[in-house]
Amino acid sequence: MITEYIKVTPQDTEILTKAGEIIRSGGLVAFPTETVYGLGGNAYDPKASEKIFAAKGRPGDNPLIVHVAAPEDAEAFAYTNETYYKLCRRFAPGPLTVILPKKDIIPLSVTGGLDTVAVRCPSHPVARALIKAAGVPIAAPSANISGAPSPTSASHVLHDMDGRIEMILDGGCCDIGVESTVIKIEDGVCTVLRPGDIIPRELCSVIPDVRVAAAVTDPTAAGDKPQSPGMKYKHYAPASRLVLLDGDREQFKEYVNSQKGKCAVLAYTEEIGNFTRAFVMDIGASGDAHTQMKRLFSLLRDTDSLCADVIYAHLPPKTDEFLALYNRIIRAAGCDIVKL
Ligand code: AMP
Ligand code: MG
């Protein structure tokens, strides 16, 4: 298949109409969102979701998020409730995904066999224009080959999806750089299944009782039946071994400088001059969680061309602000953590 790659703005009505038509008729279009690039198909068409799983090599029990242009559009395929609308009033459109009971119109192939469906209303103008042009909700996981770092630019998508899908819409780099916060609500308790840019403390302003699923910070806690199937799979892994170092900056510097092999380091901006023999990549200032989230996946992809024996990075703190970064990087490293 020839993949059409097109630069697009929200005003490019002709291109977006064509992309919407591809989705409505069962094809796949990758598109930018404020979190990462999504790989979109018609959420009502089981064949389209099968194509998504095939293009990504994604395990069939890892459900897709269904994207809508407005929170009330979820009524067509999910049983909504007052808490959902309260959350939407505060956070939609934006990087929040809410798990709701599904209606029959959503095929089980979209939800990985679950009786619930994940709903998100993205804020990116191209994503919103595409959903409107398609006229159907769009099922879309991240547009990467399963297991690879999520794509934060259209060139990442092209690298992974060229020849596998009908179209890639290039709307520039993603602002946030990590996937949406995924939550479920049960008996008035909000559980964060996947952390993202919307942090637990912010959710507390709408639902006072917010908990974080154990598997967010400890993948081995996911067990055989995790609450969110995506928790159990290897994720975001670069080609080289990624090792997280748990220690202060001085210990980090000494450890990296004492290594013999060909190594790369994801260093804080303040310490990029500290390394004598590693290839240094700037992940952002030590306290700047937003910049670090925005750069993480892109830097992990960049390390692939270095053919390094090992990549070192700091183990982030487990605070609210760094929770998404912590969650992604420990999975990228396969929990390979060295205590200094
Ligand atoms: P991705 O599409 O790569 O952003 O991954 C979607 C994430 O949402 C995965 O971690 C899924 O496990 C999670 N997810 C989607 N639908 C559900 C659902 N019905 N229940 C729990 N988690 C879900
Ligand atoms: Mg993904």
Image (cartoon, grey):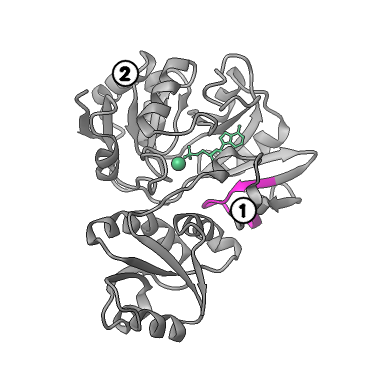
3D distance between C-alphas at marks 1 and 2: 40 Å
Q: Residue furthest front?
A: 260
Ligand 1 quadrant assignment: top right
Residue type, mark 1 in image: Thr
Instruction: Tell me which residue sits at (48%, 47%) in the image.
Output: 234
Residue under label 2, please give it.
22
Counting the numbered discs, the total is 2
Residue type, mark 2 in image: Ile
Quadrant the N terminus occupies: top left
Instruction: Tell me which residue sits at (71%, 36%) in the image.
Output: 83
Instruction: Tell me which residue sits at (24%, 33%) in the image.
Output: 162
Q: Nearer the viewer, residue 159 or 222?
A: 222
* Residue 153 visible to the viewer: yes
Does the magenta segment cover residue 198? yes
Residues rendered magenta in the picture: 191-202
Place residue 271 in its image quadrant: bottom left
Instruction: Tell me which residue sits at (27%, 19%) in the image.
Output: 18
Residue under label 1, please give it.
220
State the mark number for residue 178: none
Q: Earlier in the sequence, mark 1 or mark 2?
A: 2
Q: Nearer the viewer, residue 71 or 298?
A: 298
x and y, in percent, of residue 172 in the image: 28, 45
- In this picture, is 22 found above or below 55? above
